Amino acid sequence: MAAARYDVEKGGRNGEGKQRYSPQAEHLYPPQRDGEREWVPWFVPLVAAVNIVLFAVAMYVNNCPAHASRRGGGGAGACVARGFLHRFSFQPLSENPLLGPSSATLQKLGALVWDKVVQEHQGWRLVTCIWLHAGVAHLLANMVSLVLIGLRLEQQFGYVRIGIIYLVSGVGGSVLSSLFVRNTISVGASGALFGLLGAMLSELFTNWTIYSNKAAALVTLLIVIAINLAIGILPHVDNFAHIGGFLTGFLLGFVFLMRPHYGWMQRYVLPSDVKYTSKKYLAYQWALLAVASVLAVVGFAVGLGMLFRGVNANDHCGWCHYLSCVPTSRWSCGK
C-alpha cells in the first residue's frame, strides 16, 4: 500500500508523471503523502461510543413508565416500546417525535438552557450539551456523520488536533446558540460536527498547493456545507449552533491543520541538481494562522462576555433569526 501511495502522490519512483492527488477517490480529504505519519483513529470511535452510552444513561434516568404512572391517567401505555424496553422506553411521540427522553430529563443531565447558563451561572452546560441527544434519530444522524467525517481526519492529523477542533467547535456552537436562542433547550453534537466541516474547508485553503484538482475539492466541500446549513433553516433545528461550530472550526483549521507545502515535500524526489525551497511553510500559511488565531480568541472573548452579561444578540441583529428558521406557508418558526 505504501508503494501504491508513493506512485500516485509522488509521480512514481522514477519520477514518471506529476499527479499529486487524485480527487476521484476522496477529494474531500487531504492526501496522505509518503513519509507522513498515518494515525490509528481512536478518538472519534471513543466519542461515538460515549455519546451512545450517555444516551442510554439518559433513557435510564428518564424512566418513562414510572414518570407517566405518577402523572396518572394510564399514561404509561403511551410510552413508545414500553413492552420490551421497559425503563428505557421512549417518551410519547407527541412529546418527543425523535424517540428519546423528555425535555426535563435533558435539562437535568446538562442540556443548554439560556437562563440556567446566564442567571444560574451554569456555564458547564456549554460543554455538556454536546454530549446529549434528543432521540435515536438525532443520535444516529450525528454519529454516522461523525464517523464519516472524523475518522479520516483523525487518520490524517491525529487525535490531539482533531480532538481540540471537535470540542472547542462544540463550545463555539453552544455560545452562539445561547446568544440567539432563549426559549428552548439545545442538545447535540451538531456544532462540533460542523466544526470539523469548517476545519476541512480551511485546511483546503491553507494547504492549497498539495491539491491537484483544487476546483473539484472546493466545489464538492462547499456543496456539502451548503446543504447541511440549508437543513438548519427548518423549524426545530438550532442552526446557530451549526454556524457557531462551523466558524470556530474554520478558524481552528488554519491553526492546527497547516501542512508543509508541495514544493518542500518534493525535495525527496527531485534530482540533486534541481533547486527547491528550503521553507517548510509558505508565508501565506503563517499569515492565515496568525489572523485566524486572533479572530478565534477575540471571538470567544466577545461571545462569552456578551453571553454572561445577558445580552440578547437578536436586539443587535434584527434579521439574524432567519439564519435558523425561515417561515413558509407550510410551517412557522414561533417566537
Image: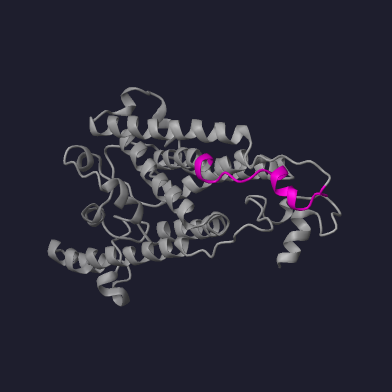
Residue at 70 percent of width and 48 percent of height: 265
Tell me if I can see residue 327 in this picture.
no
Residue 74 x, y percent position in the rendering: 18, 67
Is 151 on the left-hand or right-hand side of 210? Answer: left
Is 198 on the left-hand or right-hand side of 127? Answer: right
Q: Quadrant of the N terminus?
A: bottom right
Residue at 80 percent of width and 54 percent of height: 11
Residue 333 x, y percent position in the rendering: 37, 37
- Does residue 50 lie above or below 258 as drawn? below
Residue 183 x, y percent position in the rendering: 26, 39
Residue 182: which quarter of the image?
Answer: top left
Instruction: Please tell me whether residue 131 belongs to the stretch shown in magenta.
Output: no
What number of labels is visible?
0
Front-lying residue, 274 or 7: 274
Residue 28 x, y percent position in the rendering: 63, 50
Tell me if I can see residue 241 in this picture.
yes
Q: Quadrant of the C terminus?
A: top left
Instruction: Please tell me whether residue 259 belongs to the stretch shown in magenta.
Output: yes
The residue stretch that appears in magenta: 254-272
Front-lying residue, 164 or 323: 164
